[in-house]
Image (tube, grey):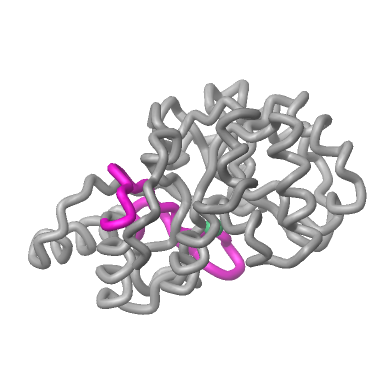
Amino acid sequence: MNKDIILPEFYSIDLHSHLIPGIDDGSLNMEQSIQMVKTLKEMGFKKLITTPHIMSHKFPNNKDIILRGLDYLKNELVSNNIDIPIQAAAEYYYDEHFMELIEKKDLLTFGDNYVLFEFSYTTPVFGLEQVVYKLLSAGYKPILAHPERYSYFNSKLEKYHQLKDMGLLFQLNVNSLNNFYGKKVKIAAKYLVDRGLVDFIGSDTHRPNYLESLQKSLSLKEFKSIENKNRILNKYL
Ligand SMILES: [Fe+2]
C-alpha cells in the first residue's frame, strides 16, 4: 500500500462495497474480506457501509442473509484485531422484487434513510420516474449507484440532469476517474464531477484489485476536483 496517500476528510466513509464473503460477485471468501477491510482501514477510512447485491435473478439476497453475513464478518474482524465500524445495507437492482420491497417499506437503508440502487447497464429502463416517486413517497432517499456506468447515458450526458431533477442522488465510483471501467465511463464521470452533480462517492470494492486502483485514483487531479465542485455527503453518514 502506498503510505503517501492521505484520504481526504470528505471521503472518510465509504458507502458502496461488496465485502461480505460468498453472497454476491464480491469477496470470494472470508480471507479476502479480511484482507480488503484491513486495506481500507490502512487507507484511512473511518467507517464502511457494505452493500451486497440484491438482484432476484442472480443474487437472491435478503435482509437476513446480509445481516447474518455482516455478523460473521464482524466476528472475524474482531478475531483478527481489525477495529473499524462496519454496517451493511444493499445495492438493489431495479426489478419486480425491488418494487415489492418498496411497497412493503422493507428496504435496507443507511444514514438518513438512503437506499442505494442500480439498473441495467445496457438496456434503458422504463418507469424510472414512477419508481423514484414511489421511493420518495415512502420516505426513502434514493441514491443511484455509479450513474457514469450506464452505457446508454454515455452518449446522452444531458440525461443526467433529468435524473437529478426526478430527485435522485448520485454516487460516483471513484475508480471511474481512473479508466478502471473504460474511456467512456471516465468521460461521463468527469462530466458529473465538473457539473457538480455528485452527492456521494464510493469504492464499489469487489476484489483486492479495486483497492489497488482506488489508491491510484486518490492522487488524480480529477479526484481532487470533486470536493471543489460538488457537495459530497459521505462524511455525514
Ligand atoms: Fe456495487
Figure quadrant of the N terminus: bottom left
Q: Could you tell me which residue is drawn at 72 percent across and 56 percent down? A: 149
215 magenta-colored: no
Residue at (51% x, 61% y) in the render: 216
How far across and how far down the image is residue 40, in percent? 33, 57
The answer to whether residue 28 is seen in the rendering is yes
Q: Position of residue 79 (x, y in %)?
A: 8, 65
Q: Position of residue 53 (x, y in %)?
A: 51, 59
The outermost residue toward the right is: 155
**Going by the image, does 224 lie left or right of 111?**
right
Q: What are the residue bounds of the magenta stretch?
A: 42-66
Residue at figure coordinates x 58%, y 58% from the top left: 175
Near-viewer residue (45 or 25): 45
Count of labels in the image:
0
Quarter holding ligand 1: bottom right
Q: Nearer the viewer, residue 129 or 25?
A: 25
The quarter in which the C terminus is drawn is top left
Q: Is residue 71 left or right of residue 213?
A: left
Q: Is residue 61 magenta?
A: yes
Is residue 54 visible in the rendered image? The answer is: no
